């Protein structure tokens, strides 16, 4: 699941030149903006069947925390 | 002898979608002020009634609560129109403004946006142009488009497609119906204070909001700014105007 998640991050944020790491504070990426946030939310819904709201995203810093949230939402 | 102003809507019956909120409500109030009888269409009954209350009691106005997202239900409008015919004007202000990144846009989302923003107007205008519904003196149809029919914005490709479709629609219909004295025009507003623009992404980001404000030399608009343009297009003052897109944008497109 971790690899699928990281692939999703690369695709959603269109990261072409590096591999995202779990400890990355992804909102500091150059690729992060209001639109990539909407893309990420839609992709998480599509591929993992979970709804992560923009409010929930506010409290999440690293990719690991985001993945934990996805797993929690999946139950 | 008392001369009626060419801008007056006295004696006219005007159907307005989206009349329960924002620009549509402002159009309803402005039309009533110019003497029209208003037929208000929306979903929320309470807010439709509030609109009728704002329209005053000089005329017997009417309201119909209907989900325009359901193409099959729009036939119901015909019964309503028959009760109130002849109809002299139409304003299509019902609409949604989705912000969806292109790569995750889904068929369901574009079907919904096109149904409400475009096809519901098409369906209603097919009913309005029927013999027995349209006024024998002609008619004026006003479709609320957007400056996004002319310029782009990130995340707005779906919205822009629906709003551009309206511009194409009015041009061909203007020609098809000119000999029947039915005029078709669009209005393209930029940002107008309303519940819809309150939901925009830039409202959560001070820098982005400032940028939007800077793009409007005359400041953001109010529903009435668009409604006054609609009154002109509905009135006899615009009898020689058809197939146009009237930009009402506080100077947004001037640069
Ligand atoms: N505000 C702006 O900055 C702006 C700028 C350019 C263009 N526009 C366009 O102007 C139009 C009006 O916008 P607004 O700002 O007045 O928006 P608004 O305040 O959100 O009002 C939208 C209206 O559409 C109606 N509506 C929505 N879904 C419907 C459905 N499924 N069936 C029937 N009615 C439905 C709503 O009725 P209920 O509330 O009863 O459901 C409401 O009356 C839209 O087409 C918009 O694209 C707005």
Image (cartoon, coloured by chain):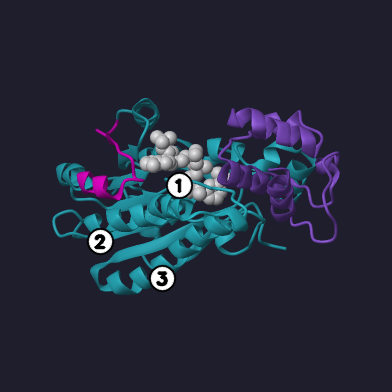
Chain colours: A purple, B cyan
Which image quadrant is residue A71 in? top right
Magenta-drawn segment? B58-76
Judged from the image, the secondary structure of the residue bearing numbered disc 3 is helix
Residue B99 appears at what percent x and percent y? 59, 48
Residue displayed at 62% across by 47% down? A43
Mark 2: few, some, or many residues within 10 Å (few <14, many ≥20)? Answer: some
Q: Is residue B49 visible?
A: yes
**Measuring 49% from the left and 46% from the top, which residue is drawn there?**
B96
Q: Chain of mark 2?
A: B
Q: Chain of mark 1?
A: B
Q: Is residue A67 magenta?
A: no
Q: Is residue B145 left or right of residue A62?
A: left
Chain at tag 3? B
Q: Which marked residue is nearer to the observer: mark 2 or mark 3?
A: 3
Residues B31 and B192: in front is B192
Q: Secondary structure at mark 2?
A: loop
Could you confirm whether marks 1 and 2 are on the same chain?
yes
The residue beneath circle 2 is B138
Between disc 3 and disc 1, the foreground one is 1
* CA gap, disc 1 and disc 2: 26 Å
Q: CA distance from mark 2 to mark 3?
A: 17 Å
Say if disc 3 is inside 8 Å of ligand 1: no
Q: Which residue is mark 3?
A: B171
Image disc number at residue B95 = 1
State whether discs 2 and 3 lie on one chain: yes
Front residue of B74/A39: it is A39
């Amino acid at each position: 699941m971790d690899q699928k998640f990281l692939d999703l991050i690369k695709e959603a944020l269109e990261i072409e030149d590096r591999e995202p790491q779990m400890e990355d504070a992804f909102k500091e990426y150059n690729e992060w903006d209001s639109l990539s946030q909407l893309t990420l939310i839609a992709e998480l819904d599509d591929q993992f069947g979970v709804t992560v709201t923009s409010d929930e995203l506010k409290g999440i810093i690293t990719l690991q925390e985001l993945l934990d949230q996805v797993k929690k939402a999946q139950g | 002898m008392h001369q009626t102003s060419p801008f007056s809507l006295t004696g006219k019956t005007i159907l307005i979608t989206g009349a329960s909120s924002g620009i549509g409500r402002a159009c309803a109030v402005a039309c009533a002020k110019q003497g029209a009888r208003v037929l208000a269409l929306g979903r929320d009954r309470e807010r439709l009634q509030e609109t009728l209350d704002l329209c005053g009691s000089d005329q017997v106005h009417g309201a119909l609560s209907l989900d325009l997202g359901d193409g099959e239900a729009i036939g119901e409008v015909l019964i309503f129109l028959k009760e109130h015919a002849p109809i002299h004007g139409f304003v299509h202000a019902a609409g949604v403004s989705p912000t969806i990144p292109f790569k995750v846009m889904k068929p369901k989302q574009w079907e919904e946006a096109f149904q409400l923003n475009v096809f519901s107007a098409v369906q209603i205008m097919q009913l309005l142009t029927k013999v027995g519904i349209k006024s024998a003196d002609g008619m004026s149809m006003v479709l609320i488009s957007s400056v996004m029919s002319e310029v782009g914005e990130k995340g707005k490709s779906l919205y822009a497609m629906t709003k551009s479709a309206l511009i194409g629609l009015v041009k061909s219909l203007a020609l098809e119906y000119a000999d029947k004295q039915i005029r078709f025009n669009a209005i393209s507003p930029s940002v107008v204070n309303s519940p819809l623009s309150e939901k925009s992404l830039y409202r959560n980001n001070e820098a982005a909001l400032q940028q939007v404000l800077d793009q409007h030399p005359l400041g953001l608009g109010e529903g009435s700014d668009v409604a006054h343009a609609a009154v002109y297009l509905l009135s006899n003052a615009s009898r020689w105007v058809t197939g146009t897109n009237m930009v009402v944008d506080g100077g947004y497109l001037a640069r």
